[in-house]
Image (cartoon, rainbow, N blue to C red):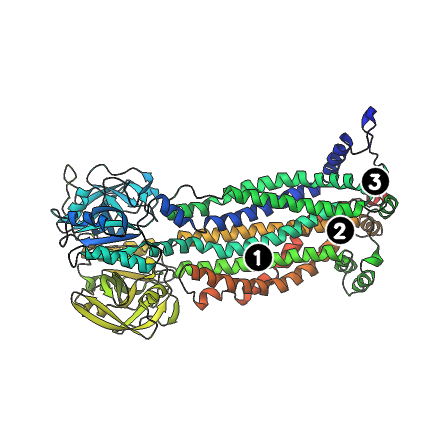
Amino acid sequence: MNRVPEDGARGRRPGAGGALGRVVRSGVGRRRVQTAVLVLTALVSVAASVLGLGLLVASAAPFDRVFADQRGAHLRMDFDGTAVTGRQLAATAGVPGVTAAAGPFPLATVPVAVRRDTDTSGPPPGADLGLLTIAGRGDPAAAVDVLTLTAGRWTDAPGELVLNAQDRPPEVIGSRLAASSPTGAVMLTVVGLAGSVTHSADGWATPQTVTALSGGGHPAGYQMLYRLADAATAHQISDGRAAITAALPAGAAADSQSYLAIRQLLTANAAAFVPFVTAFGVIALIMSVLVIGIVVGGTVGAATRRIGILKAVGFTPWQVARSYLAQALIPAAVGVLLGAGLAVIVARPVLGEIAETYAAADVGIPVWVIVTVVGAALALVSLSALLPALRIAGRRSAELLRSGRRISPSARGRSVQRRLAALPVPRAVGLGVGSPFRRPGRSLAMAATVLAAAVCLTFAAGLMYSLTSVQHSRDPLSGPAVEVGPRLEFGPPDPGGAPGGPVGPPAGAGLVDAAKVADAIASTPHTLAVFGVAQAEVSVSGLAGGSTVVGLSGDSSFADHQMVAGRWLSGSPGEAVLPTNALRQAGVTVGDRLTLSASGRSTALTVVGEVFDLSHDGLRVYVDASALDALGLDGEPQSFLVGVQPGTDLDGYLDDLNARVGNLGADAHTARDGASSVLTTMNAVVALLAAMVLVVAGIGVLNTVLLETRERARDIGVFKSLGMTPGQVVAMVLASVCGVGLLAGALGVPAGVLLHHAIVPMMGGTAGAVLTPGQVAVYSVPVVALLLAGGLVVAVLGALAPAGWAARSSSAAALRSE
């Protein structure tokens, strides 16, 4: 018997001070394994809960807060510089309903490419940055749309450029760019990155630089930014735009954009985290309750004899409960604090993505989330320790001392154990299979934990498959390995920053001879397929403002496109394929007619397909190149996308192809893969949350089996004295969890598939997209077969350590302990 000393000469009641503290310290020290398990359980559970709830709160609605801080523009309007003056635009600040205005800012939309003599670590030399809308601003601060400088510095001289920080890495700073203008190439140097919550432009430069981009003399366009008194709905925004347009000459307004469209786009990325983070958070919460209850309740239940000793020497039931509460809270508090800190650290990548999206620097897990989760975890531990301790401590001392740690076989499934032990399997396995019936309540809790782990594993695997499929098909023109476009070379700028003359085709121009380039590509060995791409800004019926129409020539069926409905282009004239977002805004469906207009001409097309497209705001229209010719536009390919045969050495292929197309004014380079940082971050978060949940499940199994083997120490000692080998002991212990693991897998996999099929379409809906059946139905037969064994693997891995401890234990010591 462990004798609890009285508290010195004062003779105070045991537990009234120092004695109670010694009991607590003794309990923590004697059960080091349970203490370590409780620390680890609390750490992982709290980390998963803080991470899940923190991401949920951080991604909920940061747009409105950042929009207010940066005085975002409710309405952005672009104007024709030849139809209106800057003074007329400035006067629109007094239009009824306008509460604040910024501008007019000179505006130019020009094709931009990286100069070939750029030696920075940013975009590769010759890379085409596409059409960039550049506004002329002398200061990032304004009455509307305050720009947040995220890297580098602001422009202070002509020829310097600050790019929009969205999707631009800091390495782009220092890059030298060439922008095409009506009078030649204008040289620009990137000096900084800035964020605009309303995406008012792709970049900003001095007004003089923007005037040079317009060809000198007079700006080609102006930009005005407005805040309106009433801007809660699209109808109110439309009324404000109409009032401003009415105050200006007819035809002055060229384009406009409501902040509501930007809000929907930005919040879609962050909101896509919410469904699956919520699902993981609920699973982690359920498992935390189960595992903490098993760990703490099992520790108290295994100390029945010790509680009897404490009561025999004078401890009251409440004092016993307090001692075990302290024994649970001390390690739990350590684990809770470590878990909260871990969650803050691992949340940084996702929160950094959200901060980059909104050009904000203070997106983080709120303190109240950490306090709430920490408080709830400690309260759960307290209840898990107090309730069983009070229940056991309320029994008589003699009863507790007599029962000790022995469990009556007749009360724990004696008949079931006997039947299972008689199965035609090795005796050790039969004994192990019947072990869960000794403690059915504890076994059910462990089974629920493993079941939750199987659900989580199945859900996470399917989610990562779906996200990978979405990543590959987010741009319908992704997939080809090589892109061939015009070779862009420019002479150096004159002293003082004046534009240098173009050497070869200006940035953004088409190929010199597209037919010869196509023949050269086709004749290059290992070429699998090729198609041409031409783009133009045209008017599309039902879509406000201009839209980018992509004209394709050749067989583009090998590109990574996923069809939501209908089919892809067949190469026949008169067909169009639109993304889901464009179809919704245009108010048309597959089979309807769509009208394109440009330069006074129009052509009607039939919508033959709805394609999955998360790139370019999902507003591009894909047509056969003949549709551009019908509008009087140049349908000749501006670039080619090339597929190569499997196993081809890409570097060698590019060298061979460049040798063939170089003298034609073309350049071959690796095609952009169109990868999304948001989807990459989602995959990382899924893997992290799944790993945390699986660790919690493994801890629950480990502690349950550990308690079981300690309670059966005498039985194991008898078995070993009768000749049971250490290997047979391991087999017996592992067999005790195999049935639970197999059952959890059989039930967990279907539940995980159902959860996946419910959550993944919900994620697509928050991003404004409809997922295709191929992106949802990702569970193949081999994958399901592996997942069915997931519960068994989790259970066996959790039981390995206790099985090893039982195999190494001394039978003599086990028999003496009774």
The residue beneath circle 3 is 311
- Residue 128 visible from this viewpoint: yes
Closer mark to the observer between disc 1 and disc 3: 3
**Dot 2: within a 10 Å radius of its alpha carbon, few (fewer than 14), some, or many (20 or more) residues?**
many
**Mark 1 touches mark 3? (CB < 8 Å):** no
Looking at the image, residue 622 lies above or below residue 204: below
In terms of image quadrants, where is residue 586?
Answer: bottom left
Residue 527 location in percent, x, y? 31, 63
Identify whether 416 is placed above or below 282. Answer: below
Q: Nearer the viewer, mark 2 or mark 3?
A: 3
Residue 644: which quarter of the image?
A: bottom left
Q: CA distance from mark 2 to mark 1?
A: 26 Å
Disc 3 is placed on an element classified as helix
- Identify the mark nearer the N-term, 2 or 1: 1
Q: Is residue 337 above or below residue 783?
A: above
| Image point (75%, 60%), residue name | 433
Looking at numbered disc 2 in the image, what kind of residue is underneath it? Glu
Which residue, given by chain and number where applicable, does mark 2 sit on? 708
Instruction: Give the quadrant of the N terminus.
Output: top right
Residue at mark 1:
456
Which residue is located at x 78 percent, y 58 percent?
431
Q: Is residue 325 left or right of residue 72?
A: right
**Horizontal and vertical percent position of residue 304:** 80, 45
Q: Is residue 384 or residue 621 the one in the foreground?
A: 384
Three-letter code, disc 3: Lys
Between residue 789 and residue 219, name the one nearer to us.
Answer: 219
Q: What secondary structure is marked by label 1?
A: helix
Identity of the residue furthest to the left in this view: 217
Count up the numbered dots. 3
- Residue 44, percent from left and from top: 59, 46
